[in-house]
Amino acid sequence: MSSPATPSLSAEPVQAGGVPEAGRRRRLPSKRMRVFAKNRAAMVGLFILAVFVFVAIFAPLLTSSDPTLQNLSSAFEAPSAHHWLGTDDLGRDILARIMYGGRYTLTIGVIAVGIAMCIGVPFGLISGYLGGAADMIIQRITDILLSFNAFLLALVLVAVFGVGLRSVTIAAGIGVLPQFIRLARGQALSIREEVYVEAAVAFGEKPATILRRHILRNALTPIIVYATLNVGLTILVAAGLGFLGVGAQPPTPEWGSMLGEARSYIFHASYEMTFPGLAIFLAVLSFNLVGDGLRDAFDPSLRE
Amino acid sequence: MTEPLLSIKDLSVSFRTRTEVVKAVDGVSFDVYPGETLGVVGESGSGKSVTMLSVLRLLPNTARVVTSGQVLLRGTDMLRASKSELRRIRGREVALIPQDPMTCLDPVLRVGGQLREAIRAHESIPREQRRLKAIDLLKTVGLPQPERRYAQFPHEYSGGMRQRAMIAMGMANAPSLLIADEPTTALDVTIQAQIMDVLRAAQHNTGAGLVLITHDLGLIAEMADRVVVMYAGHVVETGDVHTIFKTPRHPYTLGLLGSLPQVIGAEKWLRPIPGSPPDMASVPSGCPFHPRCPLSRDRELCRTELPALSPAVGDGHRSACHFSDEMDGDATSMLAATRPVR
């Protein structure tokens, strides 16, 4: 397993030996990585995640079945040596579909959070740092967004944008956007009071420079931690939309859509629904475990 | 005398809270001339930091601050300057070296980057030149191995080194006025002396005026040319450093001198000033020092009327005490005459 903690651990003695004084102080960031590495739950999460990513990337090498190839003569086959997880109502290999489906589900989750970060963080930082009218306007809009729950908001947005992978991704991103605005604003509010920000003002630096160089940099750790935690949520939102049939369209093997398609056969072929559900569950769990671990290691103050 | 660099005229600063108005600075006036070192002394809460922060307009506007008076910096009224004017002046004309060297550098940026940034705020020169200038600045403030220090993070610096780095940032644009807010409070005595040397050298190189905010009289005696003594938001005494230390004409200044260990006489006990500084939300009427003053002795005038700064012993020496005539002789004899407090 390739955890990011391993290289930093092995690099430790070399560094300490090279420049003794500087090496000792440099240990700070990797010390946190060690806290993270010692967190067993987080390591389990990271392992599951690594497996999912690996399988999604190398799916064509790992399975010879085509995830979209229909074969009605072999529909509803129970798990067997040939089809490990059975086949669905159209005779497609469920394992292959799950393996390929990971590509969609994981990508949607990560990109959606990326969208939320790219929009939410700048607005939140500006809102918190400048205060006044800008803060007022941004926060009232955030209030409105927050009054819907993430899934409901995403559902409304899909209704607006139309059905499809792209709009589901955007919708899931906007669904978690308000939390990012709030988090970034809170960070900006507290970092704004730091002496080094005051000093930067006293040296005549521009607000834009201060925001970018000082506020953003210092806010980044909790934001990244929070983003990891939110990937699980966006996956869930996207899968939910897929389940309702407004997400990825057939024959795309997205896990949520698979769940939705299998819904009608739940009594007849329960495995068709069980395995995609399990995949979603494990993916969300792994992101949450990793996120929790990162949070505990890097920013325990975020713990709710 | 030459034109003052900084001229504070009748400055008042109040903070409005939900329930009360706290007058942190009340009618303060003084000048700073090019090349001189002015020491501003006073207890915590005497308004010395607030005064200097309002020079740079750095008081938090969230606190609902009310300011009046004038702060003229080479003719520009800082209290009425626009945002862009302020940005031009901050760092270029006046630089503030903050109080706490442990927190004034951004922990996530390399020191060199922060220095470059301070330079870039006022001077557009190529990146490589900025780097060389930054390394040069680090060398000027006496950091060994400036090239290596340049690439390090603040957590790799000691407290004294951070303070040096801050001075380097302050000097980056050769400002004509340096304000050092208790630059040595968090440092041990040896480092304090080194930092003061660095400050003195920096000031010498650029001919800048230096305002030294401190409650350390030893530092003042060593560094300052002139002294402003503040108490409860007022200037109570001002004059050149020798006059203030030798023939103080305000009982508060005398009290401060008396509370110093071993500076004057061979006293066995320190002599604290009785009582404690007033709550700034309810400053005593009349002379704010009267409840703690040995001269006041419940005299009516002290309780009812605020004494004005009026000429005392020497040239430019002024004291705000109704009964400063009763203080004659030098500090040693005056302290000897009062009973030691045990």
Image (cartoon, coloured by chain):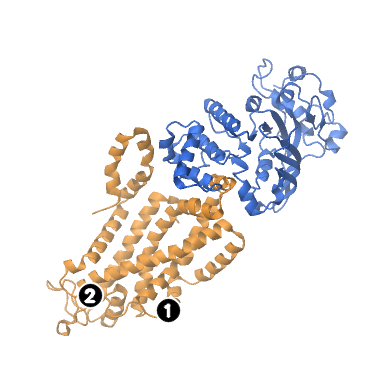
Chain colours: A orange, B blue
At mark 2, the secondary structure is helix
A119 vs B79, left or right, is left
The residue identified by callout 1 is: A161
Q: Name the residue: 80% across, 24% down.
A: B313
The crowd level at tag 2 (other Cα within 10 Å; few <14, some 14-19, many 20+) is: many
What x and y, as percent, mark residue A203? Answer: 57, 45
- Visible in this render: residue B282? no
Residue in the image at 57% along x and 67% along y: A140
In the image, residue B109 sits, relative to residue A268, either above or below, namely: above
Residue kind at label 2, given as amino acid type: Tyr
Q: At label 1, which amino acid type do we have? A: Phe
> Residue B208, image x and y in percent?
63, 35
The chain under label 2 reads A
Let me know if marks 2 and 1 both belong to one chain: yes
Observer-nearest residue: B269 or B187? B187
Using a 10 Å C-alpha cutoff, classify the residue at mark 1 as few (fewer than 14 neighbours), some (14 to 19) or many (20 or more).
Answer: some
CA distance for labels 2 and 1: 33 Å
Q: Which residue is mark 2?
A: A271
